[in-house]
């Protein structure tokens, strides 16, 4: 049944960024609606495995985290956003813990892994289902509050009104003083167009970015799409699966057909992905049983202890497909994964359209043209919270 409504804040999307924004706006006193394309559970965030970055180690700091992002982005990231991201990372983690996320611990502290491009161990994990744990906690918080949820209600249009915005979401027409766009990236649609595999959820199709651009919003680096270096190449059931980067953090290395290490397995994502493509082009790759290009990821170097604590889901998936990654090497090739760029935002996540905010993968600048792993979930929480608070404040001013 179609419904009209009037809210302070309307959030579009139910991934980690949209949920964090909605919870934060509601806790700031706003009347909040959240509309999403499919079920409330469907999003990329829940598929995230590896982890979330925050500088907790004794030999680490938010400044060091920021410098790693600057280097990995090839000096293209917006450092105003990066400084917010890295300095608020520890408090974002504590907020998630208050909502019920239980990060894996060892020796009295967080179990931290070093991810590609990082100068210290900085990746917190919940086993290898970190995104699932974070979205469950955020969803519980959203559902426990007074947020009005519209599932199966994709945003189709956004129109400026005298006192805010009117959105058509599915069959509903909703008015809101401020709007938060948290609809993720477009890699599923992009991979379909290119005839390639993608790690993404079918909802990652990018039309909300298009709607914002048509309304006059500015974007940056939209052409910079990221390949995950380690897509699953074989068995067939694992094609398009993103093998967590934590496999490499815990000792797995990339090998060519001759068993030689041809790149630093913990280099920045774009460098590692390109090295694999180049190695295959040189004729030093291997072929999957269905004729796809691949190289080896030697996962037999991971200790059973590390695998059981930090890679249990990956192990289960491969073993169900008839391969034990702890006793045999697995086959991998880069796969379309992430939209690095997006809508231009300021430090409060406001776009160049007044009263329209953007957070998560739909926004650009935080990662420049090349994201480090573990910074996307972090961006969702840090800028989701900021967007929620700022949108609520502006709506009630
Ligand atoms: C397999 C995989 C593993 C990953 N691992 C990690 C990791 O370990 N660490 C890390 O930091 N990052 C990781 N990432 C990246 C990270 O998970 C995502 O970039 C991030 O979670 C995106 O969150 P989001 O809230 O911006 O978007 P999403 O989680 O994609 O949510 C977008 C939401 O918007 C909805 N939507 C889309 N279009 C519309 C519309 N027209 N109207 C209404 N709603 C709409 C979708 O249905 C969805 O609910 C991974 C990604 C994938 C795919």
Image (spheres, rainbow, N blue to C red):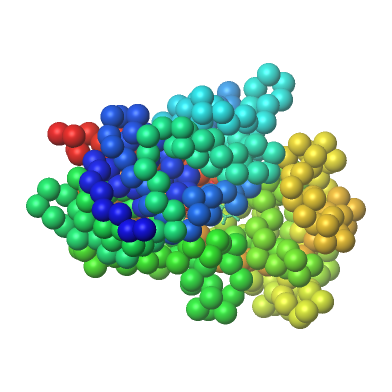
Quarter of the N terminus within the rendering: bottom left
The residue positioned 34% from the left and 62% from the top of the image is 171
Residue 13 placed where, x, y %? Answer: 41, 52
Q: Is residue 25 visible?
A: yes
Residue 137 placed where, x, y %? Answer: 54, 35
Q: Outermost residue toward the left?
A: 162
Q: Is residue 130 left or right of residue 204?
A: right
Residue 122 vs residue 91, the one in the foreground: 91
The residue positioned 81% from the left and 45% from the top of the image is 302
On the image, which quarter does residue 100 sit in?
top right
Q: Is residue 80 left or right of residue 272?
A: left
Q: Is residue 227 visible?
A: no
The residue positioned 51% from the left and 28% from the top of the image is 99
Residue 169 placed where, x, y %? Answer: 33, 59
Q: Outermost residue toward the top?
A: 108
Residue 223 placed where, x, y %? Answer: 40, 68
The residue positioned 67% from the left and 61% from the top of the image is 241
């Amino acid at each position: 049944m179609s419904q009209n409504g009037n809210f302070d804040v309307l959030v579009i999307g139910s991934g980690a960024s949209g949920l964090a924004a909605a919870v934060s706006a509601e806790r700031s006193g706003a009347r909040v609606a959240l509309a999403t394309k499919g079920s409330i559970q469907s999003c990329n965030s829940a598929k995230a495995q590896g982890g979330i970055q925050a500088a907790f180690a004794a030999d680490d700091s938010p400044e060091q985290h920021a410098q790693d992002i600057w280097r990995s982005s090839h000096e293209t990231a917006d450092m105003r956003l990066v400084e917010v991201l890295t300095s608020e990372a520890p408090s974002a983690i504590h907020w998630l813990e208050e909502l019920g996320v239980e990060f894996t611990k060892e020796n009295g502290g967080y179990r931290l892994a070093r991810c590609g491009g990082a100068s210290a161990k900085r990746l917190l994990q919940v086993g290898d289902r970190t995104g699932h744990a974070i979205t469950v906690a955020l969803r519980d918080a959203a559902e426990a509050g007074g947020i009005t949820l519209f599932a199966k209600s994709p945003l189709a249009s956004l129109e400026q009104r005298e006192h805010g915005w009117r959105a058509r979401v599915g069959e509903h027409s909703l008015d809101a003083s401020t709007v938060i766009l948290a609809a993720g990236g477009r890699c599923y649609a992009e991979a379909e167009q290119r005839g390639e595999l993608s790690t993404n959820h079918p909802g990652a199709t990018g039309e909300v970015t298009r709607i914002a651009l048509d309304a006059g919003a500015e974007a940056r680096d939209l052409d910079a799409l990221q390949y995950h270096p380690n897509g699953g190449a074989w068995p067939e059931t694992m094609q398009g699966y993103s093998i967590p980067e934590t496999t490499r953090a815990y000792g797995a290395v990339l090998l060519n057909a001759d068993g030689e290490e041809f790149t630093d397995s913990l280099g920045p994502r774009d460098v590692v992905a390109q090295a694999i493509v180049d190695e295959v082009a040189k004729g030093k790759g291997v072929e999957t049983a269905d004729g796809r290009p691949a190289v080896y990821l030697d996962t037999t170097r991971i200790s059973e202890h590390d695998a059981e604590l930090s890679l249990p889901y990956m192990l289960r998936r491969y073993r169900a497909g008839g391969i034990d990654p702890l006793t045999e090497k697995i086959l991998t090739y880069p796969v379309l994964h992430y939209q690095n760029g997006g809508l231009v935002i300021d430090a409060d996540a406001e776009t160049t359209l007044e009263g329209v905010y953007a957070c998560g993968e739909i926004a650009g600048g935080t990662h420049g043209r090349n994201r480090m792993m573990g910074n996307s979930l972090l961006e969702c929480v840090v800028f989701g919270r900021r967007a929620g608070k700022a949108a609520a404040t502006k709506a009630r001013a």
